[in-house]
Image (cartoon, rainbow, N blue to C red):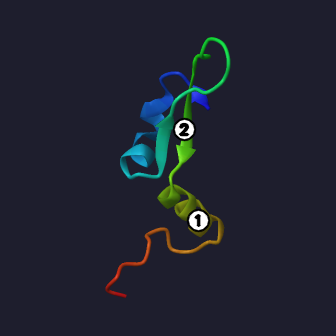
Amino acid sequence: MLAHGSGLSIWYLIRDGYLKRVPWNGTGTPPMVEVYEFTQAGAEFVMRWADAQPLDPPTSDE
């Protein structure tokens, strides 16, 4: 969760397909936050980063 209006700070992650905004699924009035989750590509990116691997996924030419 991020503060409402924080999308600009993670815009590149959203544009590149690593994060996606998901609807608030809590009870009651939605808080002043935005909820995001990693896509499959985003999860793989984080795993490569954590393992100190190249961040660009391998291409089919390699």
Q: Amino acid at mark 2?
A: Tyr
Residue at 42% across, 78% down: 58
Residue 56 image position (x, y, % from top left): 43, 69
How many circles with numbers are drawn on the protein?
Answer: 2
Residue at 56% in and 32% down: 35
Give the numbered dot on residue 36.
Answer: 2
The residue at the far right in this view is: 27
Residue for point 50% across, 28% down: 6
Eye-nearest disc, 1 or 2: 2
Per the image, label 2 sits on a secondary structure element best described as: strand
Task: Name the spot of residue 45 as percent of width and height, x first.
Answer: 53, 62
Q: Residue 62: x and y, percent?
A: 37, 88
Viewer-proximal residue among 51 and 59: 59
The residue that mark 1 highlights is: 49
Is residue 40 depicted above or below 1 in this figure?
below
The 10 Å Cα crowd at callout 2, few under 14, some 14 to 19, many 20 or more, is: some
Residue 61, located in which quarter of the rendered image? Answer: bottom left
Q: Which mark is residue 62?
A: none
Mark closest to the chain's N terminus, 1 or 2: 2
Give the amino acid type for the residue marked by disc 1 in the picture: Trp
**Mark 1 vs 2: CB contact within 8 A:** no
| Residue 39 percent location from the top left of the image | 50, 52
> Relative to residue 59, is residue 51 drawn left or right?
right
Please, which residue is most extreme toward the left here? 61
In depth, the one of 54 and 32 nearer the eye is: 32
Secondary structure, mark 1, is: helix
Q: Label 1 to label 2, Cα distance in Å?
A: 19 Å
Q: Quadrant of residue 32?
A: top right
Image quarter (top left, top right, bottom left or bottom right) of the N terminus = top right
